[in-house]
Amino acid sequence: MEGLLKIIIDHWLSIAIIMSIFWGIRGMVLFTQRESWTDYVFWWSYQFIFNSVGSMAGWCCFYILAVRAQNKLPELQDFSLGDFLLFIFALLGLTGHLPQVIYGFVESFGKLAEAAMKRISSTGK
């Protein structure tokens, strides 16, 4: 376990950059379907940045979690709620789902606020 953590901590930036570029390109290819060239270039750039930054955030969480775990070896005890949240963010970021999850939460809050405003305006009449 200590050897694996040392490799991750020593080489995480290289791995993170390569994987973030991969997830960025994946986002460009899968999620860009526009008609005009200007829309295409904009969405290509947007999807690349959106997905690569999400992946890099996951890798940063993974690095912090690896450093914390290394400090708690060999027992791996005394993990906190913060460590659990880091694990969740790292898992979502490493698998390429963090940007979509965050976007889903933001969109859900927007719809919730819209529904609340409709409810308030309909009861006010």
Image (cartoon, helix red, strand yellow):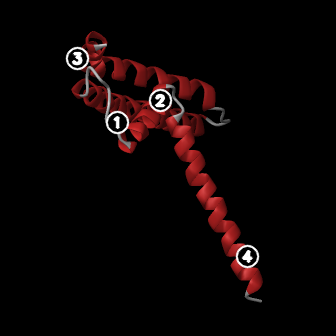
Residue found at x 47% / y 27%: 24
Task: Name the element at disc 2.
Answer: helix
1 or 3: mark nearer the eye: 1
Q: Which residue is mark 1?
A: 79
Q: Residue type at mark 3?
A: Asp
Q: Earlier in the sequence, mark 1 or mark 4?
A: 1
Q: Amino acid at mark 2?
A: Leu
> Disc 1 or 3, which lies upstream in sequence?
3
CB under 8 Å between callouts 4 and 2?
A: no
Q: Residue flagged by tag 1: what amino acid is it?
A: Phe
Q: What separation in Å lies between label 1 and label 4 (alpha carbons)?
A: 43 Å
Question: Along the polypeptide, which appears first: circle 4 or circle 2?
Answer: 2
- N-terminal label among 3 and 2: 3
Residue picked out by circle 2? 91
Can you tell which of label 1 and label 2 is closer to the viewer?
Answer: 1
Q: Quadrant of residue 3?
A: top left
Asked if residue 22 lies left or right of residue 113, the reply is left
Disc 1 to disc 2, C-alpha distance: 17 Å
Label 4, label 2: how many angstroms apart (C-alpha)? Answer: 37 Å
Label 4 SS: helix
Decide if residue 28 is in sight here. Answer: yes
Name the residue carrying label 3: 10
SS at mark 1? loop
Q: Earlier in the sequence, mark 3 or mark 4?
A: 3
Image quarter of the C terminus: bottom right
Give the residue drawn at x 36%, y 38%: 83
